[in-house]
Amino acid sequence: MITSKPPGPPVRFPIQPLKRFQGASASIKRPREIAHFSYDDNHEYREDDSGIQYYYDPQIGADLKDGFDTFKHFEQKEDPHLDSLLRTLVSKEKRDGQAVQVDFVTWRGMMTKIMTAPFDMFAEFEMLATRYQGTIYIEEDFQAIFASRAAEADPQSRNSRPSHLPSHAMMTYWGYKFETLALLPDTPPNTSRTFIENRTKAVVSNHAQHCSIVRTGFGPHSIILGGEVDGLWGPKPDPQKHPDAPIPWVELKTTEELGRYPSERDILKYERKLLKFWAQSFLLGVSKVIVGFRSKQGILRVIDVYETNQIPGMVRRGTRCWDGNTCINFATAFLDHLKKTLTEEGVYKISLKKKSGVIEVGRVRAEGTGGVLSKEFLDWRESR
Ligand code: A3P
Ligand code: MG
Ligand code: MG
């Protein structure tokens, strides 16, 4: 029987001073895809590449508001934990006949939040983590998400939004509308001209997705990340013939146009957004970020294509509001901190409160793995 200390006070990891994370970045391994899965039009899990789409230049001048009333909106109502990621890993382990050995397993979104925290005063997150068979698994704390959603829906606490501004729902919609306009299920000529022309009328849905699972490294820490990839720029290299070839994934983003004479404040706001675009894409090895600039009212004006690895340099030559190497070194140091703190069985909470400047890691359950690890995964590992 494991005897463990009762949960104690959280261990604090201060973000400042950033000086200790500056300089050349910790060695980074290029992410390599080890597995993938899709969600279909009903958001059902499929262990295949059916959700892959291909980038195709959308029509400038398109109205991203079009079709809002028919939006097929998937909203996470149940806690997804790490289930789809673990399910795919179980399949891989059965195929390979060996367990994946790695220091950390998590969704890409968790690492994006950690990596960008040093340069975002307003960053906040709540995650849960557990150590099992030498690996630390980190998930989003969905109970916290559901609670904050309920608080936002409460009319008493809702901030009134001026009526001339688009609603939050509309602003969410046009990101997906842009994806629908700019992605095709196959490359021409396999996709017919009529299909392409009809894209402006297609029902927008965020149910289907394709997720890439990669193995990467931050300094000495090996990590498996799973995350959604929006599309491909060209054909995916055959993993049998070219196992090391980078995959030409693209990340699509929409943002408000900067105008002819942007103010310093507008440029700063935009470069801060680039931090999120870069970190999210960098983590999965997504090589291009395609930004659709829209007017305030949602008309698509301009498309810009960035090479992901050039984004940090652009900001270094611009407002210098963030530094990519500092982000990488910070994340490396924080992973090290997690390894030293998550030494016992149970579930730990990792949280950052807005403007607090401190990430807290506290043990919230003395035994088991909570909901972090699925029954399917535990049964499989215990049966080996
Ligand atoms: P934009 O990023 O263009 O706004 P992703 O860019 O990560 O692939 O996500 C696709 C779209 O999902 C986003 O497009 C946005 O519309 C919506 N979305 C993603 N995260 C969101 C969030 N936290 N809140 C609201 N909408 C979000
Ligand atoms: Mg996406
Ligand atoms: Mg996107």
Image: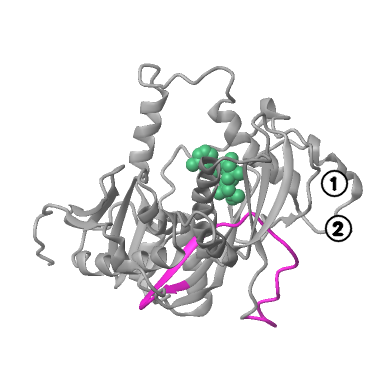
Determine which of the numbered discs, if any, sits on residue 379 in the image: none
Q: Classify 238 as above or below 10.
A: below
Q: What residue would you read off at disc 1? A: 196
For numbered disc 1, what is the local secondary structure?
helix
Secondary structure under tag 2 reads loop
- Is residue 224 within the magenta segment? yes
* Foreground residue among 207 and 199: 199
**Image quadrant assignment for residue 14:** bottom left
Front position in the image: 70 or 359: 359
Q: Is residue 207 visible?
A: no
Instruction: Look at the image and tell me in which quarter the N terminus lies.
Output: bottom left
The amino acid type of the residue labelled 1 equals: Ile
Write the residue at 64% across / 31% down.
296
Q: Is residue 314 magenta?
A: no
Residue 10 location (% of width, % of height): 16, 53
Query: Splitting the image into 4 quarters, where does residue 284 fall?
Result: bottom right
Query: Where in the figure is residue 235, as x and y percent of width and height?
Result: 75, 67
Q: Residue furthest bottom?
A: 241
Residue range of the region highlighted in magenta in the rendering: 216-243
Q: Quadrant of the C terminus?
A: bottom left
On screen, 24 above or below 278?
A: below
Identify residue type, mark 2: Pro
Question: Can residue 142 be spotted in the picture?
Answer: yes
Q: How many C-alpha atoms fall within 10 Å of the one at disc 2: few (<14), some, or many (≥20)?
A: few
Q: How many numbered tags mark residues here?
A: 2
Residue placed under numbered mark 2 in the picture: 188
Residue 332: x %, y % from top left: 35, 69
